[in-house]
Amino acid sequence: MSATNVLYDVPGPGAKRRNIIYTIVFLVLFGLAAWWVLSTMADKNQLASEKWSPFVTDSRVWTTYLLPGLGVTLQAAALSVVIALPLGALLGIGRLSDHRWVRVPVGVVVEFFRSIPVLIMMVFASQLYVQFTDIPSDSRPLYAVVTGLVLYNASVIAEIVRAGILSLPYGQTDASKAIGMRKGQTMTYVLLPQAVTAMLPALVSQLVVIVKDTALGGALLGLQELLSQNRTITANYGANTIAAFTVIALLYIVLNFVLTTFAGWLEKRLRRAKKSTGAVLGAGDADLANGPGQAKTATGA
């Protein structure tokens, strides 16, 4: 039986005709909707060349607004990722602890911050910085945005890490115990390296969410990120709101496409490396993991 037959029945002649009709109807409706949108924009003078030409003819649109805004977006996203990834990994491992005094508090923290909208955490963090710190007002939005993104996304990443580790066959843990590895060594040398490949698609999706959520800081806290530049561009170039939003949306698409493409390349590389090296832990690896003092226990000598 072919792989396609496992997933669904092969359509017959009648089903193929219906699929063709549905496709044609959809394309016609989509074309009519696109025509209506474009004609409405033309009636509102939103397709006039003077509203779109600044993005091609005036470099100041890019050097003064778009590129600096993109830089702030990347800065906020990079800081959030650098802090949230290791913090989320630690929280995820903490939720798997055998010690109740570790597992329960970590679980409460993760569920608490995962349940609160990230925008509320950004606003709350901003108010905390106003009341209890001397952070300059021009830097405060960045601090607040990064704080909110880290708290929320670290909690989500913790669940991704926990699910990735739990998805591995339990035989991996049994095998590591059989050669004398402690739980920390099992987690470090056996489970986490294998779980990374399984977790990577979900982690990349969360990184894309981090990049997009930086726009919340611009909308409410005054962070001069990419999306917030729409207001200044519109004010300086003749109410070209739709044109500005379109260009900004394309920049987001390109940015996230680059991120997902890199992640796809990295995932394939990790899978090839796993196939080439194998997932079996040899006696020499066990000696290294256990340390010099435990080599005899691992090898049975």
Image (cartoon, grey):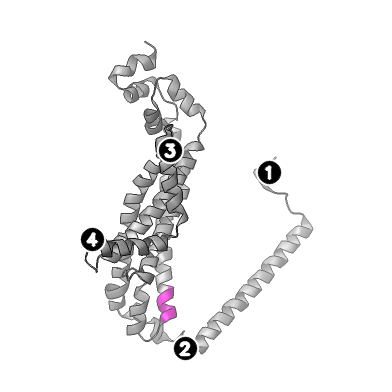
The Cα atoms of the two marked residues, 2 and 1, are separated by 53 Å
Q: Which residue is mark 3?
A: 103
Q: Which residues are magenta?
A: 241-246
Q: Position of residue 137 (x, y in %)?
A: 24, 68
Please give the label number shown on residue 45. Answer: 2
Residue 140: in magenta span: no
In the rendered structure, which disc, 2 or 3, sits on the residue that comes first in sequence? 2
Q: Are marks 2 and 3 in contact (CB under 8 Å)?
A: no
Q: Secondary structure at mark 1?
A: helix
Q: Which residue is mark 1?
A: 6
In the rendered structure, which disc, 2 or 1, sits on the residue that comes first in sequence? 1
Q: Quadrant of residue 294?
A: top left
Q: Quadrant of residue 259?
A: bottom left
Q: Is residue 277 above or below residue 82?
A: above
User: Residue sitting at 44 percent across and 46 percent down?
Assistant: 108
Q: Nearer the viewer, mark 4 or mark 2?
A: 4
Residue 244: in magenta span: yes
The Cα atoms of the two marked residues, 4 and 2, are separated by 48 Å
